[in-house]
Image (cartoon, grey):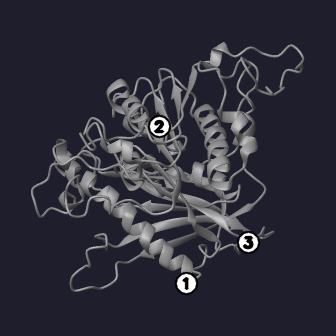
């Protein structure tokens, strides 16, 4: 009998190794996180939704090609004393030939919670290649708690290890975002649960990695017909939307008032050429690591900042960080295999540190440009580019004090010596 029990215990251990157990909530700020990183005052509800193209024999020229998508909605909600916090479950590709590996993590949203009446900016989120919406819940929950309705698209990408399908993912991403924006506008008008309080006249686009390429294109960047995988033969879905073609510009989502691109792909793929990004006019926040070998930094992320000349733009740089800035902290089940771990974690920076800083900057940026709160300008418009160069004001005492900001002073809302390794660049929009 003992031999049988031992065999069963071994089997259970092996099965557990292939899936993550839920871990403590990771959406809480670390003690050294800057001021605006903490969740806001709203409770958060969660719903799932399907986005289905309307049946048409032949799409009209103004319609964007669509495929059936699913999405998750996080929204400001009424607190429920008996509400059970969600456990997110999703899968990412494992190291070949393992196939997809399941993970889980705890959030603080409550499924089906009653939405708060109001009018909140609509935030559309696009995940990275082979990612899932749940892996960006750290961002979605936080923004919803601050008065945003956040919709994260599930793009249903193939396994990233199958490189033969990469060009198809690149083709589909901006089409998905443009279609989702149209479908969401219709559902908002119909007062769909979780969406009734969203304001499509104040649409924000946020994307990570391949999703960053997608939201930049959906924000108005014009595709270059001569560049990389975008140079598709006539008749392929994306070719008609490139510069000089009949439907150029139709991928742009209307009423976009702010864009956040985290480690965006696109430049190395030849997506827009030297001119395409100049068509973006909405304020832009770029976030990237200076050692990003996946999409490139000097030849990948930084050129986006240089070429989007008609946008008021900011560029938050994590010195020596890599690509994995967009996903949540590694769940417990991702901590035994290096492949799984590196989906989530950076080799240099603590992930909770990255998230706290990014949430602070994204909150300041969106509050200013999506809600019109000009008090947030002080968090963004510092004359200090290298975080380590900001002086600490002698009048501010206390170990846990926050900087008030100001000329030559440490960035507003940061603790003493906690902006080391960071850069914050800004440029005004060109006429």
The number of numbered discs placed on residues in the rendered structure image is 3
Q: Nearer the viewer, mark 3 or mark 1?
A: 1
Identified at 70% across, 57% down, the residue is: 145
Residue sitting at the far left: 233
Q: Nearer the viewer, mark 1 or mark 2?
A: 2
Q: Is residue 383 above or below residue 229?
A: above
Q: Which is nearer the eye, 64 or 309? A: 309
In 3D space, how far apart are the residues under numbered discs 1 and 2 (Cα atoms)?
39 Å
- Which residue does the numbered mark 2 point to in the structure image? 430
Q: Which is nearer the eye, 264 or 73? A: 264
In 3D space, how far apart are the residues under numbered discs 3 and 1 (Cα atoms)?
17 Å
Mark before the other along the chain sequence, 1 or 2: 1
Identified at 75% across, 37% down, the residue is: 35
In 3D space, how far apart are the residues under numbered discs 3 and 2 (Cα atoms)?
39 Å
- Which residue does the numbered mark 3 point to in the structure image? 116
Identified at 18% across, 57% down, the residue is: 239
Q: Is residue 386 above or below residue 193?
A: above
């Amino acid at each position: 009998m003992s031999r049988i029990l031992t065999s069963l215990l071994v089997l259970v251990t092996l099965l557990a190794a292939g899936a993550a157990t839920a871990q403590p909530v990771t959406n809480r700020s670390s003690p050294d996180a800057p001021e605006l990183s903490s969740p806001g005052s709203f409770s958060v509800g969660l719903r799932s939704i399907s986005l289905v193209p309307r049946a048409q024999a032949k799409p009209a020229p103004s319609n964007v090609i669509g495929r059936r998508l699913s999405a998750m909605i996080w929204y400001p909600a009424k607190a429920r004393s008996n509400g059970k916090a969600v456990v997110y479950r999703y899968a990412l590709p494992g190291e070949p030939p393992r196939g997809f590996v399941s993970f889980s993590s705890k959030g603080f949203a409550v499924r089906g919670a009653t939405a708060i009446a109001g009018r909140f900016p609509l935030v559309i989120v696009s995940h990275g290649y082979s990612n899932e919406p749940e892996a960006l819940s750290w961002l979605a929950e936080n923004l919803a708690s601050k008065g945003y309705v956040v919709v994260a698209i599930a793009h249903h990408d193939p396994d990233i290890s199958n490189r033969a399908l990469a060009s198809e993912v690149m083709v589909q991403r901006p089409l998905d975002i443009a279609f989702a924006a149209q479908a969401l506008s219709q559902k908002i008008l119909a007062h769909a649960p979780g969406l009734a309080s969203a304001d499509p006249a104040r649409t924000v686009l946020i994307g990570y990695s391949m999703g960053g390429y997608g939201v930049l294109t959906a924000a108005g960047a014009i595709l270059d017909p001569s560049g990389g995988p975008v140079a598709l033969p006539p008749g392929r879905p994306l070719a008609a939307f490139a510069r000089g073609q009949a439907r150029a510009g139709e991928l742009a989502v209307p009423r976009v008032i702010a864009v956040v691109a985290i480690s965006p792909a696109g430049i190395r793929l030849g997506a827009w050429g030297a001119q395409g990004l100049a068509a973006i006019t909405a304020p832009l926040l770029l976030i990237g690591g200076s050692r990003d070998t996946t999409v490139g930094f000097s030849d990948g992320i930084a050129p986006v900042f240089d070429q989007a000349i008609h946008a008021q733009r900011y560029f938050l740089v994590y010195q020596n960080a890599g690509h994995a800035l967009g996903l949540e902290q590694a769940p417990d089940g991702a901590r035994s295999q290096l492949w799984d771990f590196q989906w989530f974690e950076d080799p240099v920076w603590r992930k909770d540190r990255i998230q706290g800083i990014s949430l602070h900057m994204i909150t300041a940026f969106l509050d200013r440009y999506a809600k019109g709160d000009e008090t947030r300008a002080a968090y963004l418009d510092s004359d200090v580019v290298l975080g380590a160069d900001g002086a600490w004001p002698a009048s501010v005492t206390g170990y846990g004090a926050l900087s008030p900001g100001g000329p030559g002073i440490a960035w507003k809302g940061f603790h003493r010596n906690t902006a080391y390794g960071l850069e914050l660049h800004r440029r005004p929009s060109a006429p």
